[in-house]
Image (cartoon, rainbow, N blue to C red):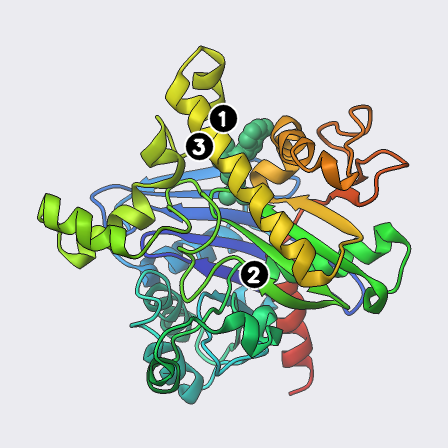
């Protein structure tokens, strides 16, 4: 079954087209639409086994962007399917499912309304996700759509671990609690890790470090999340590319009083101008490292803060799982930057955890710790689209 996987952002659409069977999957194409709503938009379409195709033209809205993707998919030269009839279902990444969605589900009018009701809690993501769903209704009428939520995998958090110590009525009235994000990545890695450990998922306790532009850690016991670093929104937790991670909430009032920023500007600063971008010269780890190597002390300080914050969360999650069997690195930095992972682990040597430099090489998948390390360290590439395609296949197949 050919499934289109969509990840719609406010000005972008990431997509993959996957031919899914129950036990196997074959990527047919992937691509990216960028700069939606700006004077010049871009489409980059990468069909497997064919030349990359690029298009530069104004893309006023998501419906236009998705139409261009569908044209590219069926184009005689760089297309991967003969007709749009072959697309049997569309799976959407939806950022926030609140407490409504512990699992992925078929998109109905009611589901759309629930996603809309979470706009206030997820103003940067859910409106774009719903926009993608409504656009598909227009350009592929009748095709089944499935919503896969970033928050669902974390719905196993016990109340002790998801409650903020705020007046309880805010949880009851407004759903204010920790939800967690990057759920499809944490779920994929939680499924893969036991295979490398040679154990059943129910016998494993480990910590996943999803370290990319957005970063989050999760504590997994018996295949279920017991704690995760992101919160009501993806702003909480470790230092990220442009997000601050944890700050004292009183900082906000102090900065606002001094700068005249309103709360929206303040949150924009915490989401888009902080983290590596705020402490250093760039949101991108490669730039920050390059600057540090040239002697930029601020860049080095940013790297040190990044490392320390991750170490602190690993320490906390070692408590949350009651002694971890493994620490797993994934996502852009976790998969590619062996040195950064080594720095994180070196600070934990008092726990007897040790990286093996001979194994800690880019491209190594699996265990990268020494044989005598008390906690195994692994590097596993994530796949955020495959769980979306799998859920879509499963839900649509049952109809
Ligand atoms: P992601 O959000 O998962 O795509 O990850 C993006 C982050 O991964 C950026 O900070 C990149 O600088 C970082 N990254 C990707 N490749 C490398 C690499 N080879 N070395 C260091 N960082 C990398």
Residue 389 horizontal side relative to residue 34, left or right: right
Q: CA distance from mark 2 to mark 1?
A: 26 Å
Residue 228 horizontal side relative to residue 381, left or right: left
Q: Residues within 10 Å of mark 1 (few under 14, many from 20)?
A: few
Mark 3 lies on residue = 284
Mark 1 lies on residue = 286
User: Sequence order check: which comes first, mark 2 or mark 3?
Assistant: 2
Q: Residue at x 62, y 75 (%)?
A: 156
- Residue 203 sits in quarter: bottom right
Proximity of marks 2 and 3: CB atoms separated by less than 8 Å: no
Q: Residues within 10 Å of mark 3 (few under 14, many from 20)?
A: some
User: Sequence order check: which comes first, mark 2 or mark 1?
Assistant: 2
Q: Is residue 31 above or below residue 218?
A: above
Residue 368 percent coordinates (x, y): 79, 35
Q: Is residue 63 above or below residue 285?
A: below
Element type where label 2 sits in the image: strand
Residue 358 percent coordinates (x, y): 82, 24
Q: CA distance from mark 2 to mark 3?
A: 23 Å
Proximity of marks 1 and 3: CB atoms separated by less than 8 Å: yes
Mark 2 lies on residue = 228
């Amino acid at each position: 079954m050919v499934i289109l996987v969509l990840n719609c952002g406010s000005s972008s659409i990431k997509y993959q087209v996957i031919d899914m069977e129950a036990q196997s999957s074959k990527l047919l194409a992937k691509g990216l639409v960028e700069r939606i709503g700006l004077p010049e938009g871009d489409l980059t379409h990468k069909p497997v086994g064919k030349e990359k195709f690029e298009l530069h033209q104004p893309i006023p809205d998501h419906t236009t962007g998705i139409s261009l993707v569908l044209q590219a998919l069926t184009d005689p030269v760089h297309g991967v399917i003969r007709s749009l009839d072959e697309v049997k279902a569309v799976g959407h990444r939806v950022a926030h499912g609140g407490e409504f969605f512990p699992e992925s589900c078929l998109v109905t009018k009611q589901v759309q309304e629930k996603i809309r009701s979470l706009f206030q809690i997820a103003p940067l993501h859910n409106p774009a996700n719903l926009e993608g769903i409504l656009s598909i209704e227009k350009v592929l009428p009748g095709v089944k759509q499935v919503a896969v939520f970033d928050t669902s995998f974390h719905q196993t958090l016990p109340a002790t671990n998801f409650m903020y110590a705020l007046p309880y009525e805010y949880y009851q009235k407004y759903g204010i609690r920790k939800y967690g994000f990057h759920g499809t990545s944490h779920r994929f890695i939680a499924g893969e890790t036991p295979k490398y450990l040679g154990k059943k998922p129910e016998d494993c306790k480990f910590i996943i470090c999803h370290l990319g532009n957005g970063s989050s850690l999760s504590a997994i016991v018996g295949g279920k999340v017991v704690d995760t670093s992101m919160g009501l929104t993806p702003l909480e937790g470790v230092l990220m590319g442009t997000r601050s991670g944890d700050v004292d909430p009183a900082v906000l009032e102090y900065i606002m009083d001094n700068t005249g920023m309103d709360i929206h500007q303040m949150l924009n600063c915490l989401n888009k101008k902080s983290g590596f971008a705020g402490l250093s010269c760039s949101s991108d780890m490669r730039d920050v490292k390059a600057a540090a190597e040239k002697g930029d002390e601020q860049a080095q300080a940013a790297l040190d803060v990044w490392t320390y914050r991750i170490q602190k969360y690993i320490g906390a999650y070692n408590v949350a799982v009651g002694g971890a069997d493994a620490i797993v690195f994934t996502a852009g930095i976790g998969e590619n930057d062996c040195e950064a992972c080594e720095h994180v682990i070196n600070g934990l040597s008092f726990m007897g955890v040790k990286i093996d430099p001979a194994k800690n090489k880019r491209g190594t998948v699996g265990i990268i710790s020494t044989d005598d390390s008390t906690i195994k360290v692994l590097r596993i590439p994530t796949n955020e689209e495959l769980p979306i395609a799998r859920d879509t296949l499963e839900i649509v197949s049952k109809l």
